[in-house]
């Protein structure tokens, strides 16, 4: 499946309620206070296609803010937990934390 690459001037399809350009999203994710960054990352994870998420959020961001992000994903949480746990199981994400579900896993 091909992914659309968002230029800084594009307003991504998932910004239906907050008309931010891709450049503004990237700037906010780099410079905004932590609470705003986490809310915006969660919005991207909820509303963008998985393959488009990585244009804005890095795997390091996902690892660093995992618990705060997953708490804000609503009904999308199950999908992200599944993906996250598969990536951990297949050594695609390297975690340093353990949980009752196993090394670095979430549930």
Image (cartoon, rainbow, N blue to C red):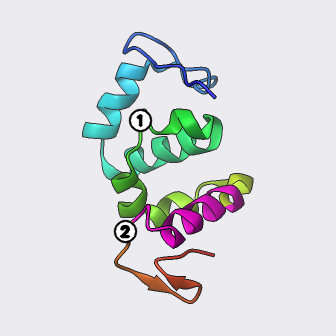
Q: Residue at x 40, y 10 (%)?
A: 9
Would you place residue 60 above or below residue 48 in this image?
Answer: below
**Residue bearing mark 2:** 94
- Residue 49 lies, with reference to residue 106, above or below; the image says above
Q: Nearer the viewer, residue 43 or 86?
A: 86
The residue beneath circle 1 is 56
Relative to the observer, which residue lies in front, 34 or 87? 87
Mark 1: few/some/many CA within 10 Å (<14, 14-19, 20+): some
Q: Secondary structure at mark 2?
A: loop
How far apart are labels 1 and 2 at the CA level? Answer: 20 Å
Q: Label the magenta part by its dominant secondary structure.
A: helix
Q: Is residue 24 above or below residue 37?
A: above
Q: Looking at the image, which residue is at 59% across and 24% down? A: 2
CB atoms at circles 1 and 2 under 8 Å apart? no
Give the extent of the magenta segment: 78-93
x then y, percent, for residue 89: 53, 72
The picture places residue 38, in percent across and down from the top left corner, at 43, 50
């Amino acid at each position: 499946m091909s992914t659309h690459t968002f230029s800084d001037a594009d307003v991504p399809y998932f910004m239906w309620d907050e008309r931010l350009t891709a450049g503004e999203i990237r700037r906010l994710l780099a410079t905004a206070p932590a609470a705003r960054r986490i809310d915006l990352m969660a919005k991207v994870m909820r509303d963008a296609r998985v393959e488009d998420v990585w244009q804005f959020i890095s795997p390091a961001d996902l690892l660093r803010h995992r618990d705060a992000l997953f708490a804000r994903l609503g009904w999308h949480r199950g999908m992200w937990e599944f993906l996250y746990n598969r990536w951990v199981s297949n050594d695609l994400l390297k975690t340093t934390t353990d949980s009752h579900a196993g090394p670095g896993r979430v549930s």
